[in-house]
Amino acid sequence: MVKTFISSPPWLLIVFLITCTLLMISFAESDPDHRKSYIVYMGDQPKGKVFSPSLHMNMVQKVIGSDTAQEHLLHSFKRSFNGFVVKLTQEEVHKMARMDGVVSVFPNEKKQLHTTRSWDFLGFPTQVKRSLTVESDTIIGVLDTGIWPESDSFNDTGFGPPPKKWKGTCDQANFTCNNKIIGAKYYRTSGLFLKNDIASARDSNGHGTHTASTAAGGLVGHVSLMGLGSGTARGGVPSARIAVYKICWIDGCDEADILAAFDDAIADGVDIISLSVGGSAARHYFNDSIAIGSFHAMRNGILTSASAGNDGPDPATVSNFSPWFISVAASTTDRMFLTNVKLGNNQIYEGISINTFDLKDEMFPIVYGGDAPNVTGGFNATQSRFCTGNSLDKNLVNGKIVLCDSFVSPRATAPLLPAGAEGVVMQDSGHNDVAYSYPLPASVLHVENGRNIHLYINSPSNNSATATIQKTHEANDTLAPYVASFSSRGPNPITLDILKPDVAAPGVDILAAWSPISSVSQAVGDTRSVNYNIISGTSMACPHVTAVSAYIKSFHPTWSPAAIKSALMTTATAMSALSNPDAEFAYGAGHIDPLKAVNPGLVYDADEVDYVKFLCGQGYDTRLLQMVTGDSSTCSNANYDTVWDLNYPSFALSTSPLTLFSRVFKRSVTNVGSPTSTYRVKVDVPSGLQIQVIPQVLSFTAVGQKLSYSVVVQGSINDSIVSASLAWDDGTFQVRSPIVVYVVL
Ligand SMILES: *[C@@H]1O[C@H](CO)[C@@H](O)[C@H](O)[C@H]1NC(C)=O
Ligand SMILES: *[C@@H]1O[C@H](CO)[C@@H](O)[C@H](O)[C@H]1NC(C)=O
Ligand SMILES: *[C@@H]1O[C@H](CO)[C@@H](O)[C@H](O)[C@H]1NC(C)=O
Ligand SMILES: *[C@@H]1O[C@H](CO)[C@@H](O)[C@H](O)[C@H]1NC(C)=O
Ligand SMILES: *[C@@H]1O[C@H](CO)[C@@H](O)[C@H](O)[C@H]1NC(C)=O
Ligand SMILES: *[C@@H]1O[C@H](CO)[C@@H](O)[C@H](O)[C@H]1NC(C)=O
Ligand SMILES: *[C@@H]1O[C@H](CO)[C@@H](O)[C@H](O)[C@H]1NC(C)=O
Ligand SMILES: *[C@@H]1O[C@H](CO)[C@@H](O)[C@H](O)[C@H]1NC(C)=O
């Protein structure tokens, strides 16, 4: 399954909920004859031939017979690569996988959906220098839940007609494009629309509107979420155009729809693809819709920016990790949202949440969930102390504020509304870096403070404990930026020695446009309709990188996806392992710096040939690669790269505890700075490692010139992760790469 990585705090929760729903649904989708939906991936379009739709039908007929082929062939990819979606039995899957031209057959599962302040916090003010004409010809393809086209953020006043290169279309179903949103399509290969799904590119969720406006929304003054986060909302490239590809529905995002959208977006002529969606089970490159789609995008010069996932802080949870796209972790900004809980004894405890409800300091009785179990419903204190589901007795919580023993997701608090609760106070030690919105007054406290409230409720002198929850106020988080706990961590689960995520960008408490037919918390019973909402997730971090990629491209229209990605990585601000214990596995190369990224000095470039060599080194064979690339690439010795030689802007080495290692990495850098320049290397290395760079000086005499160097990393380590770095410095540009050595457990 694929999920959107709503960077908003609700998203983290939603992701879990959606995952469960999706699992059930994917089974429900199988036919009575045990057919399930599969993606048959066939690589590149046959070169020099016009695509014939009968090809796919013939293949399906051969495998399942001609009677039912028509109804089981669900979709053909035909514009940017070759393949189709078909319903097959397990047995037919094996037959299909053996047919000529088939690269892979994998189940069509679902993935899930993984302001204003953030751009200023990144040092990217409104008045930044822009290449306006080019920016206005830049098209950002957003694969998400659709968009709310009437949002002020997508007002097209001042925009000319779509750029000439645009070949896409606008699906008019309940939707009108303009000169800002120049294309809109929706994908539902399964044909199954659930209640509240709108068969239109229109966004009923809010996520897609939020990500699109963060990337390319125009400037809209005086916006806020009911007074919170007040300011000017804007995207990173306000002059760019948006092409909407709706792939996510109430039940998640089908891989078939993701691939169908890539097929179109590439052919339509988008410049950058933004994808805040992912799945949790790591799969090999040609068994994953996002890896495949973004590979073909890369071949066509299009960089895909993808969210890393919201499954942190556990290790190896990063879910989008192909080397040809950029994977984005979520960091905090200096704006945090705090919500006070005031007790009858005048004690005030500060929690974290987004509470727009105003209880006007009115005191309500406060009850501990563990003291209010719904006994007739079969619950006891073991459940009710966590306030889950129907575990609480309505009669005991009605008109009261409830204290719960854990963090509860916004959606899971929905039963408190019909139960008549006035508010909910939670306690947690894991979610205290993200402010979530709830359908009722709510605050999440640190466990110690929660314990004090519990003591107050239990104090023998007080049989009438009371409390109130105040409106949220903003504060300056001077420790920012650090990576959010929910942000998925490396190491890379498939290719151990490619560092992922690549960079960190703001993804916590981001204000951006929203769909008014959704609600603030998206929990059942929440009736607050807003045009701007504050949410968190790597989903919100991703469009920041999308926008900066478009910004870089507006100055360097010919740069490859790898060059743009390199610029983002080597100019990123190093983050501290002290405030981020997982170090590079949390933040990759560091926190993006949009202005520096436009002028990186040197880039680590890579093209399709480099990735093919890398795949050969990963054990993919010639037959497979020829199908994928549609040319005569072979995995001969000359065309084979170890993972350490892929021209990647970071270095990773996995090893065993206390084992001596010595590993050589080869790299080449392309001069994109001053024609004549001399770069010297600076290595930052902790004890226990030796790092040698050969040569130590690179002298360039022209722009575009490439020079190679090697890095030898030696030593033995016992720590889970040891961080080092190297930087090429010519006095003007510093081109920094992290070097990570880690113990595989
Ligand atoms: C790809 O998926 C298919 C079907 O689930 C499986 O048989 C195959 O082993 C997978 N390939 C890789 C490389 O994981
Ligand atoms: C777009 O913005 C312009 C200028 O601010 C305004 O006049 C116009 O009414 C807006 N259009 C829509 C559809 O809101
Ligand atoms: C069009 O979208 C609106 C939401 O704005 C929805 O209520 C309505 O049902 C949709 N109409 C159709 C025909 O789908
Ligand atoms: C009991 O509650 C009252 C009023 O709500 C408060 O003044 C008093 O301090 C409380 N006592 C304790 C022990 O918390
Ligand atoms: C509460 O219910 C659970 C499951 O229904 C049961 O395992 C547990 O023993 C019960 N606890 C008490 C204190 O009754
Ligand atoms: C107890 O839970 C059941 C569902 O499990 C619900 O129907 C009932 O209304 C609840 N009772 C109270 C008193 O909250
Ligand atoms: C937070 O404090 C820092 C340092 O004092 C300041 O630069 C920054 O502008 C403040 N942020 C906000 C949102 O006020
Ligand atoms: C290596 O790490 C393990 C696990 O943390 C520890 O038990 C062991 O003592 C360490 N060995 C050395 C030599 O530091």
Image: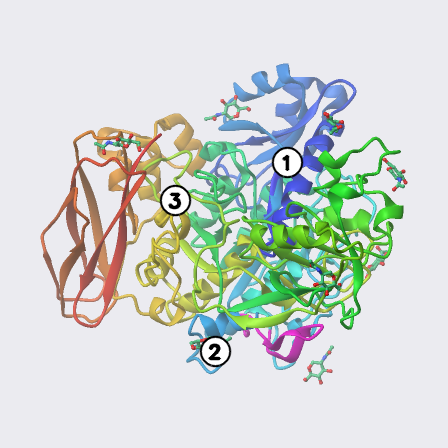
> Which residue in the structure is indicated by mark 1?
53
Gap between marks 1 and 3 measured at Cα:
32 Å
Ligand 2 closer than 8 Å to label 2 CB: no
Magenta residue span: 218-239
Comparing 518 with 397, the one in front is 397
Sequence-wise, the earlier of marks 1 and 2 is 1
Sequence-wise, the earlier of marks 2 and 3 is 2
Gap between marks 2 and 3 measured at Cα:
30 Å
Q: Tag 2, which secondary structure?
A: helix
**Residue 593 relative to residue 466: left or right:** left
Which mark is on residue 323?
Answer: 3
Q: Quadrant of the C terminus?
A: top left
Q: Give the image location of residue 159, x and y in percent.
A: 60, 78
Q: Tag 1, which secondary structure?
A: helix
Residue at x 48% of width, y 41% of height: 291
Residue at x 58% of width, y 16% of height: 95
Crowdedness near tag 2: few (<14), some (14–19) or many (≥20) residues, C-alpha within 10 Å: some
Instruction: Decide if residue 145 is in sight here.
Output: no
> Which residue in the structure is indicated by mark 2?
132
Q: Disc 1 vs disc 2: which is toward the camera?
A: 2
Q: Is residue 123 above or below residue 264?
A: below
- The part of the image, by quadrant, that contains residue 589 is bottom left
* Residue farthest to the top, as pictured: 91
Q: Tag 3, which secondary structure?
A: loop
